[in-house]
Image (cartoon, grey):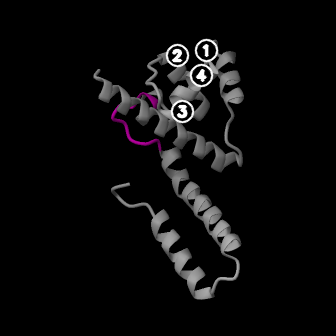
């Protein structure tokens, strides 16, 4: 694997992990912590150091560890092939939660904009809301 391929694989894994963390947050209301994930893995005999987790979730280094992938797949309730980056489709559970995650993020941005901008005209607020709705709508190329 070339350096560029290795970096692309690391970034792909990070993207999938963040996506799964977003799904858990949408379902439970809180993002899973390193301690929760590491504890879950430890119960299954798999060790995950904080630094390794940070490498994985931030895309700094590609980690190829089937035991870690299997444990994380169990934690996130997806196939380990999804984490490994095989050409499998996004799990249905994840796809189903994406719209909710997008809506939640758009709502946070709208709320922040309304609070920050203060006395803004209703027309301007409507235009901002319309723009955010369009940006958060999934498109085929995203």
Mark 4: few/some/many CA within 10 Å (<14, 14-19, 20+): few
Q: On the picture, is 86 further left or further right than 112? A: left
Residue behind mark 2: 67
Residue behind mark 3: 57
- Which residue occupies the foreground of this view, 139 or 93? 139
Q: Is 104 above or below relative to 19?
A: below
Residue behind mark 4: 51
Looking at marks 1 and 4 on the same chain, the residue that comes earlier in the sequence is marked by 1
What is the count of numbered marks? 4
Residue behind mark 1: 46
**Circle 3 SS class:** helix
- Which residue occupies the foreground of this view, 142 or 111? 111
Q: Is 104 above or below relative to 113?
A: above
Residue 31 point in image, percent of width and height: 67, 42
Q: Which residues are magenta?
A: 83-91
Looking at marks 1 and 2 on the same chain, the residue that comes earlier in the sequence is marked by 1
**Circle 2 SS class:** helix
Looking at marks 3 and 4 on the same chain, the residue that comes earlier in the sequence is marked by 4
């Amino acid at each position: 694997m070339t350096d560029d391929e290795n970096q692309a694989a690391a970034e792909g894994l990070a993207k999938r992990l963040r996506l799964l963390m977003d799904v858990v947050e949408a379902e439970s209301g809180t993002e899973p912590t390193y301690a929760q994930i590491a504890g879950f893995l430890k119960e299954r005999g798999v060790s995950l150091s904080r630094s390794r987790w940070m490498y994985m979730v931030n895309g700094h280094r590609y980690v190829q560890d089937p035991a870690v992938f299997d444990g994380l797949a169990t934690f996130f309730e997806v196939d380990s092939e999804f984490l490994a980056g095989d050409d499998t489709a996004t799990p249905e559970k994840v796809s189903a939660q994406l719209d909710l995650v997008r809506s939640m993020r758009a709502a946070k941005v709208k709320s922040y904009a309304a609070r920050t901008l203060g006395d803004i005209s209703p027309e301007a607020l409507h235009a901002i809301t319309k723009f955010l709705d369009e940006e958060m709508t999934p498109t085929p190329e995203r």
